[in-house]
Amino acid sequence: MSILTPDITATLEQQGIELPSWAFGNSGTRFRVWTTEGTPRDVFEKVADAAEVNRVTGLAPSVALHIPWDKVDDYSALRAHAEDLGVALGTINSNTFQDEDYKFGALTHEDDRIRRKAIDHHLECIDVMDATGSRDLKIWLAEGSNYPGQMDMRARQDRLNDSLRQIYERLSGEQRLVLEYKFFEPSFYHTDVPDWGTSYAQVATLGDRAMVCLDTGHHAPGTNIEFIVMQLLRLGKLGSFDFNSRFYADDDLIVGAADPFQLFRIIVEVIRGGGLNNPDVAFMLDQCHNVEAKIPGQIRSVLNVQEMTARALLLDHDALAAARTANDVLGAQAVFMDAFYTDVRPALAEWRERRGLPADPMAAFAASGYQSTIEAARVGGTQAGWGA
Ligand code: LRH
Ligand code: MN
Ligand code: MN
């Protein structure tokens, strides 16, 4: 009998991980952007590549867009294109980090003209959501200062709150606003939304459809991220994840690659806090594939999340509760590690086959010929990159 019980597979079957359109474009560091053959030239091609990840894994039903990187004239046509390929358009990410006007802030800016421009950009993003059928507007702000004394941090919080309220008021129906935090970069002294507490304090004043987005790469080294996950779930304010992994800063590497145990611990808390199929929590990747192949990089990523989810679902809660009640420190830790160390890969491969999916999605993609087809077809035009 498989170690994956029917209860576990029923949960796994519901799992969906949103892919970021920008993972399929070229990216790099501030030193160099690397190019690869077959890289999409527009968002239609990015969506096609994302659909390929879903085809071989059954795990990636939607694609997040970044505006203006993925700006098009006709979002209904893009939506129809995605639906034809079996995927949906997901979270809309605003972008106020590449415009000269925003050098000293956007939603926090002292100058009313610039702050109005930034608010209007978000209102346009909500127009896009109306056309794409997206639920979430994700806001990450590259705002802050480099030197003590440079800016009035408190006044900026007040302006931020006013800007967010104007944006929130434009949402309709099921639409939500998720506010992402990041402890530093591009500003190095102070950041206007540096931590979950600030994001929470801001969204809590707006209403029920304003939540916090937790990007796993946006914390200081050593931060207990699963504690934050637990707390936000407890408060009913965890709206979404941006998954990736990091060694040093905001590295945007493949989720579960740098620290698989951390991913396991996070997913344990997600399950503890209401389950994986909690509709309030959106699972998304936020990654860039600088030197590795992009489509296989995304396939590897969603499989890593699935593998850690299966391991977390194997946790023996009764045994854990008994050990905790007895204050059996080593016993509780042993139960926890037993689940983490279980190799679920053969059972997952077998389960995939039973569902008509390839047992080995990486191999299936390599054998499909898709990569050589796009390399031959996508000549001419400009390759999309991080920021274009
Ligand atoms: C900022 C961030 C944010 C952006 C993305 C490209 O570091 O995580 O989510 O939208 O990177
Ligand atoms: Mn992010
Ligand atoms: Mn980031």
Image (spheres, rainbow, N blue to C red):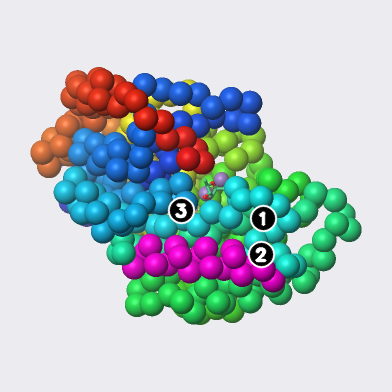
> Residue 112 versus residue 238: which sits nearer the camera?
112
Give the extent of the magenta segment.
112-130
If you read the primary sequence from the N terminus, does the residue marked by circle 2 or circle 1 appear first?
Answer: 1
Q: Which mark is residue 114?
A: 2
Extreme-right residue of the structure: 149
Q: Amino acid at mark 1?
A: Asp
The residue depicted at 89 percent of the width and 58 percent of the height is 149
Q: Quadrant of residue 111?
A: bottom right
The residue labelled by disc 1 is 101
Whichever of labels 3 and 1 marks the residue nearer the N terminus, that label is 3
The kind of secondary structure element at disc 1 is helix
Between 186 and 221, the residue placed more toward the observer is: 186
77 is within the stretch colored magenta: no
Q: Is residue 283 above or below residue 293?
A: below
Is residue 149 shown to the viewer in this render?
yes
The answer to whether 73 is drawn above or below residue 264 in the figure is below
Instruction: Residue at 61% x, 61% y: name it.
Output: 196
Q: Amino acid at mark 3?
A: Ile
CB-based contact (under 8 Å), mark 2 and mark 1: yes
